[in-house]
Image (cartoon, grey):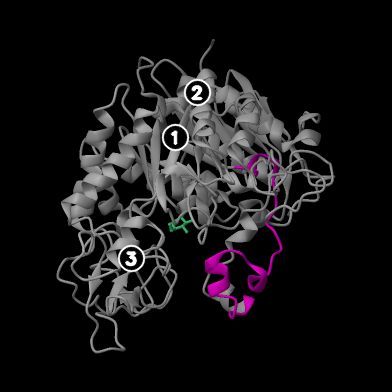
Amino acid sequence: MKNAAPWWKKTTIYQIYPRSFKDTNADGIGDLPGIIQKLDYIKDLGFETIWISPFFASPQQDWGYDIASYREIAPEYGTMADAERLIDEVHRRGMKVVFDLVLNHTSIQHPWFRESCTSKDNPKSDWYLWRDGRGKKHPPNNWKAMPGGSGWHYHPGRDQWYYASFLPFQPDLNYRNPEVKREMFKNVKFWLDKGVDGYRLDIFHAIYKADHFRNNPFHWSYIPGEDRYGFFTEWKYTVNQPETIELAHEMRGLMDSFEPSRFILGEIFGSDSLIKEYLGDTANGMHAIFLWDLMAFKFNAVFFWDALNHYETWYPPPFTPVLVLGNHDSRRWIDRVNGDVEKAKLIALLQLTARGLPVVYYGEEIGLPEGKISAKDSLDPVGQRFAWAPNWLLSLLNLYVNRDNCRTPMAWDGSNKAGFTDKDAKPWLPLSADPAHVNAAVQKSDPDSLINWYKNLLNYRKATPALQYGNLELLPKESSRNGVLGFIRDSGNQKVAVLINFDSNTQSVKLGAKRIALQTGDAFLRAGEVVLGGLSGIVVCLDDD
Ligand code: BGC
């Protein structure tokens, strides 16, 4: 197989939450110049693409996922010149940059919404989803919001209700109005014209709602399940409508109309068959869509065997599964292995050698821990909404609600404010790491550290076509029952095997390995077999060269 795979199939993505990454003007808030300052760090680690959460003009009620102007930069993050310089600086390093595109909703402070609420007949009156209620006190129907509660909100100015899939200050746009689509597409093109390489598409599955506005049917479960149901309703008329799938294809067309063509990565929740529709029969729809299996990992080989088997069964080549374990909405996964660096190295090994597009959330490379901010002190609107809920209830329902804790500042060095901000400034969220022990600088000087393991993996992957775009064949499930996950990556002219022992006992696997490419823990080759000590992992070459 020739190395003809497009860049996004071979790349590795590093997600930056700009508010928490690097502050350069001592206001306690990360900014765009901070990202620019750290591009060499990201490149040196071996990542080839960055995705940046929104930094556009916003009242910051949901920290940027509530946009008031798509073509302006929030002043605390910098200026338009900074954004342009960021794009250039990324490209100058041979890297790519993906922005975050919030199509589904705007902020209530967006001029479109401000106009839309003034009357029932202004030029933007149906740019959002407005309906009459059932009497004064009752919303138009039973449609819920993703974080719970009714999605409908009464507006006295219009004596009507508007719908918001997420929080009340994030009203959903009405894409059935062609003008809305046209104007939003102008925003999309604005950044593509400036050279942005692609977009991550925020809650894309929610964009269209059924136009009959009928009640969603009853569903027995209160607990949200992949946003297909929850709060005693099935989300039949509010997500994954046929028009949303068409829009995904239209967006792909728009990306392809640029030279060079651009990339879209969807945040979508739905069944595999729906996701396949967004991707298109011949991979002609959205380039890639987040898959969530790994997020809920259990630290054992059978779990990961099942997850990879699921990805290979549903998303074989030419599809590219997205390999993601954490983001700005979910508990930092290092906490689920109790901060154990040896275990973290095995997870990183899996994420960076399995077939797919790895997306690593800032701080994962150093094992940045979760914060300890209580829901009542939370700045996250979802955290505040659930401040009443006792921890036992949240864990029973498996709900992660205080997202502040996965958004704490990056720890760059062992100084007082961990090098995130000036020593006299107050970071917007308290640091979660003990910077004396968990920080990038100290780990860089230790060859056995987690950060250097990421660096080795990323750089090996970059030089190894079999890992970048080769096929994946799982070794039989039997060995995973003994604790060892194994798979072979084959690009046609290069073959490597990856073996990971999730168990604490030594295991051996018969395999004609030629040499070791990478290893962690006590793993070695012995006459025709690979021996794996407890919690060890290895990448071996199966070819002669
Ligand atoms: C983003 C969240 C955001 C929500 C509303 C998402 O899924 O990842 O951080 O709060 O959409 O925009």
Task: Name the residue located 65 percent from the left edge and 43 percent from the top edge.
Answer: 363
Q: Label 1 sits on what residue type?
A: Arg
The answer to whether one can see residue 534 in this image is no
Residue 140 is one of the magenta-drawn residues: no
Is the CB of mark 2 within 8 Å of ligand 1? no
- Image coordinates for residue 459, horizontal then vertical, percent: 59, 23
Q: Is residue 257 left or right of residue 16?
A: left
**Residue 240 appears in the rendering:** yes
Q: Earlier in the sequence, mark 1 or mark 2?
A: 2
Regarding mark 1 in the picture, which secondary structure is present there? Answer: loop
Q: Is residue 104 left or right of residue 443?
A: left
Label 2 neighbourhood size at 10 Å, few (<14), some (14-19), many (20+)? some
Q: Whereabouts is ligand 1, in terms of quadrant?
A: bottom left
Disc 2, SS: helix
Query: Does label 2 or label 3 sit earlier along the sequence?
Result: 2
Residue type at mark 3? Answer: Arg
Which residue is at the front of the view, 129 or 68?
A: 68
Label 3 beta carbon within 8 A of ligand 1 = no
Of mark 3 and mark 1, the one earlier in the sequence is 3
Identify residue for label 1: 355
Q: Position of residue 454 (x, y in %)?
A: 64, 33
Q: Classify residue 60 as left or right of residue 35.
A: left
What mark, if any, has residue 88 been given in the picture?
2
In the image, residue 542 sits, relative to residue 343, either above or below, namely above
Amino acid type, residue under disc 2 in the picture = Asp
Estimate the spatial distance between the alpha carbons at disc 1 and disc 2, rounded to whole Å. Answer: 30 Å
Q: Are marks 3 and 1 in contact (CB under 8 Å)?
A: no
Q: Which residues are magenta?
A: 362-391
Residue furthest top as drawn = 545
- Residue at numbered disc 3: 228
